[in-house]
Image: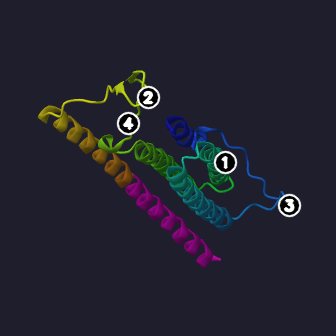
Amino acid sequence: MEKLSEKLEKTLSCTAMAAEPMEIGDEASKPVGTVDLLRRFLSVQENRAEIYARLKRGFTEYLSTGSHRAYQQLCSEITTEFNDCSKQVIEMESILGSSDYCREDLVNLLKTVQAHEKQKLHMTATIQVLKKAGRPSERLVTHERCQFKDRPFQHQCIHVNELTEATGLEDAEADAEYDAALNEAIRAVQETVTRINEHVEEIRYEIEELESRE
């Protein structure tokens, strides 16, 4: 599971890569309008939302069925799709920052969204790792390291401990740390989504402003 989460966390790492110019069709002399670029960006954000929805459904199914291979395949597909989204935005940044546009304000806005998207993905992976592990006191116990005798159901279980106030406190502390980590990750995702939505609204407002001047 940890390897899957590492793959998820890396899916937006391409934001630091140099972008190639965006292809604008056969009519190379005709520049892409700023409004068109911004609308493409909104389309990318909608696509990202759909990808997250698929990831959430896939993870829920993984928890219920334990199908590691299916979830691993889903993560591989989602990694490719997230990378494609990020590359598209990088191309838009390159165009908007060129001498034909000189819109560094929009470039910075898109870069900010990219950074928030990377943070959102990282915390989403963290949530999934924590949920897969479960609360310490509720995790299943395996007997792989126990010493078995002649009969299969007679063994020296290494998990059998005398319940004391100290061990009870340790379990409570472990659960508290787990709950705090999970709640923090969930809160971080919620806050990041709020910031992303605010910036998306800025883009929509910019589109309205540009269209009103036409």
Q: Nearer the viewer, mark 3 or mark 4?
A: 4
Q: Which residue is mark 1?
A: 77
Residue 111 in sight from this viewpoint:
no
Type of the residue with mark 4: Val
Q: Nearer the viewer, mark 4 or mark 2?
A: 2
Q: Nearer the viewer, mark 1 or mark 4?
A: 4
Cα gap from disc 3 to disc 2, whole angstroms: 76 Å
- Main SS, magenta region, reads helix
Q: Local crowd at mark 3 within 10 Å, few (<14), some, or many (≥20)? A: few
Cα gap from disc 4 to disc 2, whole angstroms: 17 Å
Q: Which residue is mark 4?
A: 141
Q: Nearer the viewer, mark 3 or mark 1?
A: 1
Which callout, 1 or 4, points at the residue further toward the start of the chain?
Answer: 1
Q: Secondary structure at mark 1?
A: helix
For residue 55, side relative to residue 194 (left or right): right
Q: Secondary structure at mark 3?
A: loop
Residue 4 in sight from this viewpoint:
yes
Q: Secondary structure at mark 4?
A: loop
Cα gap from disc 3 to disc 4, whole angstroms: 65 Å
Q: Which residue is mark 3?
A: 27
Q: Which residues are magenta?
A: 189-214
Cα gap from disc 1 to disc 4, whole angstroms: 33 Å
Q: Nearer the viewer, mark 3 or mark 2?
A: 2
Which callout, 3 or 1, points at the residue further toward the start of the chain?
Answer: 3
For residue 4, side relative to residue 152 (left or right): right
Cα gap from disc 1 to disc 2, whole angstroms: 43 Å
